[in-house]
Amino acid sequence: MKFQPRASHFIDGEYVEDTNGAAIEVIYPATGEVIARLHSATPAIVEQALNSAKNAQAAWVALSGTERGRILRRASDIMRERNYDLSVLETHDTGKPIQETTVADATSGADALEYFGGLAASLTGEHIPLGGGDFVYTIREALGVCVGIGAWNYPTQIACWKGAPALACGNTMVFKPSETTPLSALKVAEILVEAGAPKGVYNVIQGYGDVGASLVSDPRVAKVSLTGSVPTGRKVYAAAADGMKHVTMELGGKSPMIVFDDADIENAVSGAILGNFYSSGQVCSNGTRVFVQKGIKEAFLKRLSERLAHAKIDDPMDEDVSFGPMVSENQMNIALGYIEKGKAEGARLVYGGERIERDGYFVQPTVFADVTDNMTIAREEIFGPVMSVLDFETEEEVMARANDTEFGLAAGVFTNHLTRAHRIVAGFEAGTCYINTYNLAPVEAPFGGSKMSGVGRENSKLAINHFSEMKTVYVSMNDVEAPY
Ligand code: NAD
């Protein structure tokens, strides 16, 4: 098998296998073909990985930030040099078109390695002068062993978005990719070693939810960063709380995108396409509730349908293909189930709405109009290529309806009215907002959710605070006054 890795796990700088672990089959979603067979980590593998990360941490944190940063930046360069091969692997792991993976996966991972590599040398505490000559200084310290647990939609990116800030701060990591897309994280681990990372600094073990759970509850682990669904987030957060561990939770969403009638329709349609159909709709921050002001609704739907007809749906390895399969049969069936619910609950099907009859797990890009707030497709995260278009009349009305959800990951507004754009964004209950664009996530900007969509932020300087903590040192320059 062309994509079979040397072994399932990467621990202490080497590939490691334990065939006693449950089988994991890796399937190319465009054909249903098995492209690799791996094993879930046994307790012995989990133990080996955590020991390796624990043992490696003291020497890693003892390096200067400059040295750690240099290794991360070298890893970033290697990732960019190998972008095409890594993208081919990512396309086979996820089914996402090569047109996407060459610009949004290893490149995004490389951005994170470069950015946090660049920051590593400047991570410091501060000096705080007090009255009477006393002062405090703070020491920014690494947390220790961090666990990263990934979702299946952006496997390389998630492995790097968690690994890069963790390592920059002097932590070590055990990363568990999604069992659906286990291959690319192994390449990230290999590249880090090639770039000079000492053995054990970044380990990858495979497994289902039980392996993730055993990592989260281990007393050696100081921090858990999860990308996944809200139900998993609840479990992981609760288990981490038991050990008072630090957490970052990047969870699901049902984000609103509001299109006012003064918006540039072409741009709004582009935003709606990016925010619903990129990666076949399998993006956490997607703006799947598209509120369109009544005056332009039919024009918006007409242009959207015209442009969707230009989506090229075929083998994702073809460079012209812009829309690929869903990641798995299971996810496809979930999306098809929601499409049936949309039809049954009375939404108007404007585009798509069917599985595509061919090998693999292809679902048509699907648009429902006349969706109302209480329909299932407007309330639950679908994580597939299904857009709901809802009508609205006034700004006050749409603001309240946009926020009427337990989620708060992202939100967007399309309007050419300057003050209204900022007023709307100020009112959004969401961690990541967009004005006249959608779904961009540069490493320089914080990314993460409010409400049920998450805790903490990835990327930007803020991520450093989630992978380090401050030690406060009070220094007295005076005699000690005691009451007796
Ligand atoms: P999931 O919640 O099913 O699984 C996520 C990961 O958690 C997997 O690696 C899984 O094995 C692991 N896991 C499952 N149960 C666990 C447990 N009890 N303890 C520890 N680990 C456990 O999610 P998924 O289906 O892989 O991904 C889709 C979801 O991820 C969607 O809800 C999507 O919105 C979300 N997501 C969020 C972001 C973000 O940045 N906010 C990004 C991508 C995906």
Image (cartoon, rainbow, N blue to C red):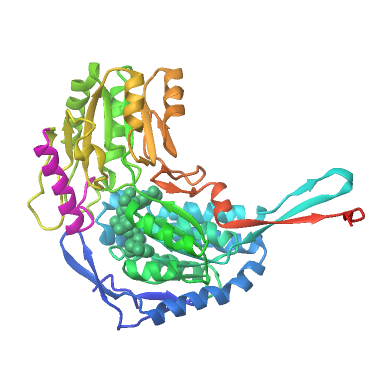
Quick one: quadrant of the C terminus? bottom right
Quick one: quadrant of the N terminus? bottom left
Determine the residue positioned at 27% across, 77% down. 22
**Position above or below: 199 against 161:** below
Residue stretch rendered in magenta on the structure: 322-346
Rendered location of residue 186, percent (x, y): 39, 69
Find the residue positioned furthest to the front: 484
| Ligand 1 positioned in quadrant | bottom left
Please indicate whether residue 478 sits to the left or right of residue 462 in the image.
right
Determine the residue positioned at 40% across, 40% down. 440
Q: Is residue 217 visible?
A: yes
- Identify the image quadrant of residue 401: top left
Please indicate whether residue 436 sits to the left or right of residue 274 in the image.
right
Find the residue positioned furthest to the right: 479
Residue 171 versus residue 399: which sits nearer the camera? 399
Q: Is residue 52 magenta?
A: no
* Secondary structure, magenta segment, majority class: helix
Determine the residue positioned at 48% across, 51% down. 111
Find the residue positioned furthest to the left: 357
Rendered location of residue 344, percent (x, y): 9, 39
**Position above or below: 20 against 181:** below
